[in-house]
Image (cartoon, grey):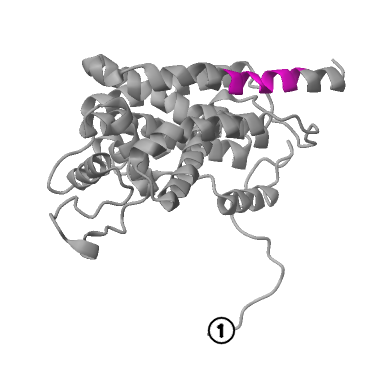
Amino acid sequence: MSTGRLSNNTQHRSWRLPLFVVLLTPIYYLVPWHRMGDIGAALGIAFLTVYVVLLPGAAISMRLHPNRNDFLEYLARSALFGLAFFLVVAFAWTLSGTMLGTFRLVFPAALILVTGLCAVPRPAPKLGGGVPPGGSDRFILAAFAFLLVWVFVLVLRTGIPIGFTADTLDHVGYVAEIRDTQTAFPTTAFYLDPGPNGEDLRKGLLHVFYGFGTAYTGAGTLTFLNGINAFLAVVLLLAVYAAGLMLFESRAIAVLAAVLFLIGVDEGLRGTVIRQSFYSHRLPCPTPARRCRASMTRAFMPTSKEHRRIPLQAPDTGARQPPGG
């Protein structure tokens, strides 16, 4: 296929996403999830995750990284870019001084705008694309996908840890206060009238997303956090996989890195780190600084077929540091 025809096909596909967003927008406004009980809460959380996070993230990912040979890496980028997009829009909302209900009302306009801008045609990038998965890679990715589904179900069933040694109740109370007060940074989550002493610098814009979600779906705060926590646990593992794929250019090593992360961090699912993925500091944000560090690391790694091993130490240049120096 010629380059011109390939470019035209890509442009046609790029407009499907904003059109899909426009078609889903009436559902965002009209479906009363809060009147459907537990089923409505589950469906509302799933719809919110797709509409508010994955769709804008997919548009931004397609704009910045047109190559989509690896679906799991593309899903990781979509989730992280989508969350980053929401945080930027939420920051703009906090500057406006309006209520949370107004933010929920106008958010689709920002969503349609960003997906439309990302779909505007541009010259084809001259970046090298990834290698499509082969036969053995497909088996590895299928097994990894099954593992991700298993982690999602297990984290969803066990729920987020609640106890005196966990900060879950702190987060639940703060998110509920965002929903009830319709403000981004409430000061009355624990005290009736604390004044400026009630400001909690540990909380950030990710809690605004949780308050946004509970207000939109009508789900209980703990119910919403349980659902979104299972999704973020999968995103956390996908981020490890995407980082491993970018650094080592091997899907097998990337999957191994995600598996080792799952079983080696705080006793895996028996601990609390994975089961508390909704904590703000768990989120692997795709900042330019991290991308630059990863790119520099990758640049100094030999990636040819003859040199796939990673050097454990820098080559000896003959220079020696004097004793005591």
Q: Quadrant of the C terminus?
A: bottom right
Q: Which residue is mark 1?
A: 325
Q: Quadrant of residue 151?
A: top left
**Within the magenta stretch, is there residue 13?**
yes
Q: Amino acid at mark 1?
A: Gly
- Does residue 316 show up? yes
Residue drawn at x 29%, y 42% as measured from the top left: 182
Range covered by the magenta-colored residues = 9-19
Task: Say which of 139 and 85 sits in front.
Answer: 85
| Magenta span dominant secondary structure | helix
Image spot of residue 168 (x, y percent)? 21, 43
**Number of marks:** 1
How packed mark 1 is, by other alpha carbons closer than 10 Å (few <14, some 14-19, many 20 or more), is: few
Residue drawn at x 76%, y 17% as measured from the top left: 9
**Within the magenta stretch, is there residue 242?**
no
Image spot of residue 184 (x, y percent)? 33, 48
Image spot of residue 26 (x, y percent)? 45, 18
Image spot of residue 268 (x, y percent)? 31, 37
Q: Secondary structure at mark 1?
A: loop
Q: Quadrant of the N terminus?
A: top right
Task: Say which of 112 and 80 sits in front.
Answer: 112
Q: Is residue 83 depicted above or below 185 in this figure?
A: above
Left or right: where does residue 120 sit relative to residue 216?
A: right
Task: Say which of 94 and 250 sits in front.
Answer: 94
Residue drawn at x 49%, y 42% as measured from the top left: 84
Q: Quadrant of residue 230?
A: top left
Task: Say which of 196 and 170 sits in front.
Answer: 196
Q: Is residue 20 depicted above or below 251 in this figure?
A: above
